[in-house]
Amino acid sequence: MARVALKNVTMNFGDVEAIKDVTLETDDGEFLVILGPAGAGKTTLLKLMAGVYKPTRGRVFIDGEDVTDIPGNKRNVAMTFEDYALYPTFTVRQNMENPFGAMEKKPSKDEIEKKVMEVASMLQIDHLLERNVDQLSGGQKQRVSLARSMVRSPRYFLFDEPLSHVDAKIRHAMRAELHHLASVLSTTTIYVTHDYVEALSLADRIVVLQHGQIQQIGNPYDIYEKPANEFVAKIVGQPNINMYSCSVAEENGKIVLQDTDDSVFNFAANHEASADILKGYVGKAVRVGIRPQDVDFSFEETNSHAIKGKVELYELWGYRGMILVTINGRSIRVLTDSDVHVEVGKDVWVDVSQAPLYLFDPETGMRIE
Amino acid sequence: MSEKDKNIMIENEIVTTEVKKKKNWFSIIGGNVAITAIFTFFLFPIIWMIGMSFKTIDDILAWPPKFLFTPTLDNFRAIIFSQMEVSGVGNIQIDFMASFWHTLLISGGAVLVSVLLGVPAAYAISRFNFKGRDDIAFTFLSFRFGPELLVVVPIFFIFQRIGLIDTYPGLIWVYQLITMPMIIWIMRSYVDDVPVDFEHACVVDGYPRWKAVFRIILPVIRPGIAASALLAFIYAWNNFLFALVLGSSNTSTLTLSAMKFISAEALRYGIMSAGIVISFLPILVFSIVAQRYFVRGLSMGAIKR
């Protein structure tokens, strides 16, 4: 168990700044998820913690000890790689035994055998031990790479997209398994993913990363409900949050949001909370976000708040569906139940008056609170 | 689906498989005929030459050419025991087997040096982003496309002064111009195809970087080393100009000895053929032995991620 900390870490590759001034600290035994799109610098961040890369600027600490200049082979950390990085000339067993060969005090053969068998049976790969790596399926490779990281007791685990290449079917099961493992081993774990569901379901805390910069650090609830900026709001949630530019006006003592381009989405800020927040913004512009599941809709005009639009597109995902509604050229994504009958081209009335609003400052991009 | 529809579908299936079969049958025959024709065209000179090595001089010079003849081992005997009778003049000695060993030593030595120095160089060029990396890589490549004639004269004078003319180290050194660029460039792209995560994973496993390279990377790139070494060896083996200008009796290579069969009083076609057969045998053997590596080694992207 250990606390890992990065202090003002910057990493350059040639002219490319992959990581920009990142400061981050884990708790002991914490499950920390780094969430971000492809190219955000997630893997680089992990490799900095692993000691594979040395930061261009900034320091790395483990339990308060400065390890910036200590190479990865002396840090006793374990990492899995996105492409598994299983040694192709080794068998599964040899792959798993590899970390023992580097130890100063090598355990006895029996001890190694015992440990390998223990981890292999835990991950259900004990029947594969004598196979070559190229005879394994993606999911099996994944397990072997996890097993290789678990045969010893590292100070912390670094997992790089461990479920991205796994079949959708077993992904769910493995997610649960990982969760279980993490709590059993109670070792600090840093887990990289681009899948927000994985992040929300596994993490004690989530670090949202974009362009090598931290956008927000928070627990899953905060990340979803209180996104620090538009980027964070967009990266969690499926389908994406609807975002509109609005101007804030006061009408009859009520705060009203007016779509800046035309008057498509004029709606009162019904929630007292958002109304209070927006008082200071009267006469100014804001960015308004509405999650697709918060939008009410009906195929008949039911109340005065509803806005008429047309069904542009309907996607059925089995348990849920998504309607893309266009209103005067503006579109809004609406999440539906699967039992709703939807016809493309039909009129639909959309009601956003009850939806919680995610409000952002258009200049800074930060959430307004 | 109705019974009728099903029948139609089945019929369609039969038709398509029949068409496929026909096409396969046709393309297999056609392909084999074409391959045979091409091979006959390209291999005929070699097959004819092998035939000549087993013929007497009378059979060789016979017209129309003889396809059926009584084979003789005289030519090989003459080469291996280096005895050639020349009527009226006596025996001349061409120690062909000695030049065989010379060539083996020089080419093998040159390839060995190139592998020992070139593979680490290729690794460094592929993995590390240092200043002037591309310039250095290009300079190595330029050794290959610079004409040998351009450099051989200055090298001759330099070698003469430092006493490297007609020595093994001298020729092995100058053969680096042939073997080194080939090994560096083939191995560079080979290492490029090996994910750097292998080293990273091994470092995380607790090994220092250099150990990770020996433990993981070296076994992975072994086919590439075999292939590039073999290719370099063939080029070194076939070299003529450097051996001609910078070598002499002590280091006379096969390419030089073969030339000696052309003399003022006779063209010894039979002996020459036997000599050539002996000189390409090692290459043939190496190629067959290393064939597995060769195909994998020269097809880039051999590492499946």
Image: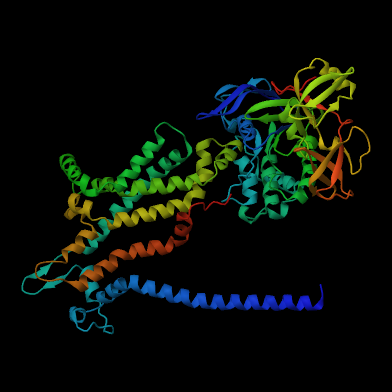
Instruction: Give how far across and how far down residue B50 sits, in percent.
Output: 29, 73
Q: Nearer the viewer, residue A349 or B126?
A: A349
Residue lying at 87% horizontally and 21% vertically, measured from the top left: A273
Q: Residue at x 82, y 24 (%)?
A: A257
Nearest the camera: A55 or A116? A55
| Residue ID at (37%, 36%) | B135
Can you say whether B156 is above or below A271 in the image? below
B120 vs B27, left or right, is left
Q: Position of residue B94 (x, y in %)?
A: 17, 64
Pinpoint residue B201: horizontal percent, then vertical percent. Answer: 60, 40
Q: Quadrant of the N terminus of chain B?
A: bottom right
Residue furthest to the left: B88
Q: In which quarter of the view is residue A255 placed?
A: top right
State left or right for residue A347 relative to residue A132: right
Residue A31 shows up from this direction: no
- In the displayed structure image, the side of residue B174 where residue A259 appears, left or right: right
